[in-house]
Image (cartoon, rainbow, N blue to C red):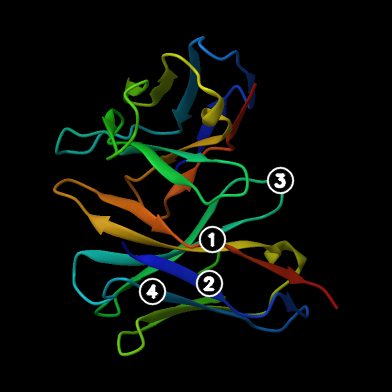
Amino acid sequence: QVQLQESGPGLVKPSQTLSLTCTVSGGSIAGDSYYWTWIRQPAGIGLEWIGRISASGSTHYNPSLKSRVSISIDTSKNQFSLKVNSVTATDTAVYYCAREVKYPSNWLFDSWGQGTQVTVSS
Amino acid sequence: DIVMTQSPLSLPVTPGEPASISCRSSQSLLNSNGFHYLDWYLQKPGQSPQVLIYLASTRASGVPDRFSGSGSGTDFTLKISRVEAEDVGVYYCMQALQIPKTFGQGTKVEI
């Protein structure tokens, strides 16, 4: 069964860049049947979809974050990554990586990482 | 963006009794293929979300049959026929029709 694990700094200073990596184990990150996604959850608030990337590098971003967000993939390392530029306190959240798998009529989040807390503070 | 609105936001439940959560979208989630792109997720305490229902009414693999989803257009419902203690957590609806995918605020179910 595929497993996802987020890693990266838990504390980022305002105006700096938040960088996280998701390592996939138990399965290959390659293939056109998957999208690799980042979702975040500020404390006490619901879930916010950040964006996703395919193994071929095709990306989709949330327009509310698009100017500050970049998602990349490294199939040789079975990893994908998230960068958020110019962070502020509002970027403080638990960040999840997740896999979307292609079904006949839809895409479905079938695997999630455990989440990693990122706090933006000086 | 499609706005998702859930109610209630907090739902006290009694084991063995039924429970119901509503989700409304700001526009129809009906795709041209005839499916409604509405998913339900449960986030148990201290865990990541897990899918319960997709395409409005299809139970995901391994999900007990006490969970059911229904609805069409902009109005959807998740029902638990008989609540069990392990069902506590926050339930989210999510529209999967458009990018960005958007979630409801969440409904906290507690015993």
User: Where residue A19 sits: x, y (%)?
Assistant: 59, 81
> Residue B11 lies in what quarter of the image?
top right
State the residue position of label 4.
A24
Q: Which residue sits at x=34%, y=34%?
A: B63
State the residue position of label 1.
A114
**Which class describes the residues within 10 Å of circle 4: few (<14), some (14-19), or many (20+)?**
many
Amino acid type, callout 4: Val
Q: Which residue sits at x=71%, y=84%?
A: A16
User: Where residue A87 sits: x, y (%)?
Assistant: 69, 75
Which badge, 2 or 4, is on the more N-terminal residue? 2
Callout 2–callout 1 Cβ contact below 8 Å: yes
Gap in Å between the C-alphas at discs 2 and 3?
A: 21 Å
State the residue position of label 3.
A44
Q: Which residue sits at x=30%, y=85%?
A: A75
| Res B31 seen here | yes
Secondary structure under tag 1 reads loop
Nearest the viewer among B20 and B38 is B20
Gap in Å between the C-alphas at discs 2 and 1?
A: 7 Å
Tell if the residue under mark 2 belongs to the same chain as the one under mark 1.
Answer: yes
Tell if the residue under mark 3 belongs to the same chain as the one under mark 4.
Answer: yes
* Quadrant (top left, top right, bottom left, bottom right) of the N terminus of chain A: bottom left
Nearer the camera: disc 3 or disc 4:
4
State the residue position of label 2.
A6
| Res A62 seen here | no
Chain under label 3?
A
A50 lies above or below B104: below
Callout 3–callout 4 Cβ contact below 8 Å: no
